Amino acid sequence: MHSLGWALIMKRGCFCSKETLHINGSRYTIRERLAQGGFSLIDLGENAATRRSYAIKRITCHSIEDQNIALREIENGKKIDSDNVIQVVDYELKGHADIVINTTSTLFIVLPFYKHGSLADHLQMRARKHDYMPEAQILQIFLGICEGLKAIHEAKPVPLAHRDLKTANICLSDSFEPIIVDLGSMTEARLQIVGQSDAQRLQDEAEERSSIVYRAPELFTVKTYCTIDERTDIWSLGCVLYAMCYFSSPFDPIYERGDSVALAVLSGNVNIPEDSIYTDEMHELIKYMLRIDPMERPFIYSVIEQTHDLIQKLEGRV
């Protein structure tokens, strides 16, 4: 069951029906469709009593397994307490999913609505004007993303990994604070892979749930005996920082040409543009996260420390 990215959160189209939804006793009028995927969609809904706007996600479940995967988004959200990670406002499961008698259930999730859309939307808008973000602004937004990711990696009782961190899954609040969204791919961070079936299962899950141009190298060809941990997200975080500088992931051009992203990722060659306006320290921070061997990749604490150091250096140069 594919999780729905938020890249289209502000791609508004005509949605003429004034559907009404009742979720846990609250009534919402559906104003328009914000995004649609294979198994889920997101609408803009207005609470009839408060007139506040929300993003209402509905996930269609065809089996108990689908239902459990969908509910995982709710359960994971409860384990994270951070201003930089989306909080579920309300939810309700309606119907009964049963693959044998061909019935479905629908999970309705009420989420905050971010009118500025996603970081991907913002970068796309800047790319059209070749409007590069100042380094200091990039680092402030990036620090917020790091804080959200730290909260995910520190989840109790076990650390979690987002596993689909990308610019489309980072929304921007009214004050332009980054909010990590789409917690449906989130899973236990630390896995012991023992044997071919474990490796294949994780590889299949990554293909389904982790966007290819942000996917860590160890998830392309999972080794038969290895340990996977939260540093899969650090690779994705490096791709996010690169995209904040140059408008897209380092592996987007390869994907668009139809060449093998897996080969490009495993080669470890990250192309920093020769005419880059950013400091060597920024380039080093990107490369620090994009290390092929996950055991050589930093944990989030080191990334935050390096980011703080770079912000201080920039302030010293002003």
Image (cartoon, helix red, strand yellow):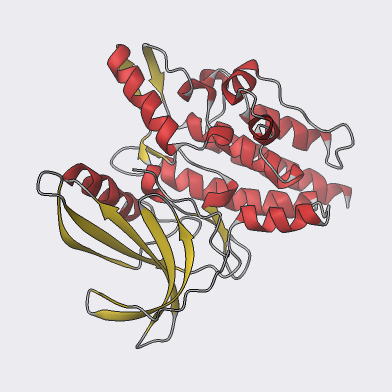
Answer left or right for 124 relative to 134. left
Query: Which residue is most to the bottom?
Result: 49
Q: Tell me the quarter of the picture where residue 66 sits.
A: top left
Q: Tell me the quarter of the picture where residue 159 sits.
A: top left
Q: Residue at x 40, y 56 (%)?
A: 81
Q: Residue at x 39, y 19 (%)?
A: 227
**Residue 79 place in picture, x, y as percent:** 32, 51
Which of the two residues, 17 or 157, is positioned nearer the viewer here? 17
**Residue 164 place in picture, x, y as percent:** 48, 41
Q: Residue at x 22, y 74 (%)?
A: 24
Answer left or right for 197 relative to 171. left
Q: Is residue 302 above or below residue 8?
A: above
Q: Residue at x 63, y 35 (%)?
A: 238
Which of the two residues, 209 or 223, is positioned nearer the viewer here? 209
Q: Is residue 26 above or below residue 86?
A: below
Q: Quadrant of the N terminus?
A: top left
Answer left or right for 235 relative to 285. left
Q: Is residue 209 visible?
A: yes
**Residue 19 place in picture, x, y as percent:** 35, 78
Q: Is residue 51 above or below residue 249?
A: below
Which of the two residues, 316 or 130, is positioned nearer the viewer here? 130
**Residue 255 place in picture, x, y as percent:** 63, 32
Which of the two residues, 284 or 194, is positioned nearer the viewer here? 194
Q: Is residue 133 visible?
A: no
